[in-house]
Amino acid sequence: MRHLNSPALTLARESLRDAMTRAGWPPPLIADAELALVELIVNAWRHGGTTAPVVHTLFLDSTLRVAVADRSSTLPEQRCPSLLSESGRGLQLVSGLTHRWGVEPHQLGKSVWFECDLDGAA
């Protein structure tokens, strides 16, 4: 069983938090981005079969873009689970916490990304 707070997950969260703090982002947006990142990493583990997904973080003016790459070519879809479902809410959470999200297929796998804007709330 994989621990959901592995050292890699902790390092990814800390790195994102540190970069956003140094760039002057407010704590509520940092918390939203951290949670969205965790969801994408966990999805890469569970659905992408990738134990060490690659995380890219990019600041473009007042926009943060975070991408998590895995080896699966299966493209994720946002689902509408029932109230009693035990899974299926991850991308809904990413959608609610961020301004945009999407998927970029690659020759070997894909990247699932999200963007947050400093000028607006998610």
Image: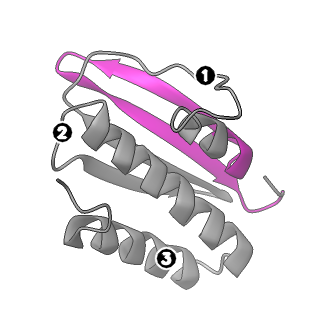
User: Which numbered dot is residue 79?
Assistant: 1
Q: Where residue 6 appears, x then y in whole percent?
A: 24, 68
Pointer 3 or 1: first along the chain: 3
Looking at the rendered image, the disc whose residue lies closer to the viewer, 2 or 3, is: 2
Alpha-carbon span between mark 3 and mark 1 = 28 Å
**Which residue is disc 3 drawn over?**
17
What amino acid is at disc 2?
Answer: Thr
Identify the residue at horizontal 43%, vertical 45% (top origin): 40
Alpha-carbon span between mark 2 and mark 3 = 23 Å
Report if residue 118 lies within the magenta region. Answer: yes
In which image quadrant can residue 23 be found? bottom right
**Which residue is disc 2 drawn over?**
50
Identify the residue at horizontal 65%, vertical 34% (top origin): 84
Visible residue check, residue 119? yes
- What is the total number of numbered labels drawn onto the structure image? 3
Visible residue check, residue 26? no
What amino acid is at disc 3?
Answer: Arg
Looking at the rendered image, the disc whose residue lies closer to the viewer, 3 or 1, is: 1
Q: Main secondary structure of the magenta part?
A: strand
What amino acid is at disc 1?
Answer: Arg
Q: Mark 3 touching mark 1, by CB under 8 A?
A: no
Element marked by disc 3: helix
The local crowd at label 2, few if under 14, some if 14 to 19, many if 20 or more residues have their Cα within 10 Å, is some
Pointer 2 or 1: first along the chain: 2
> What residue range appears in magenta?
95-120
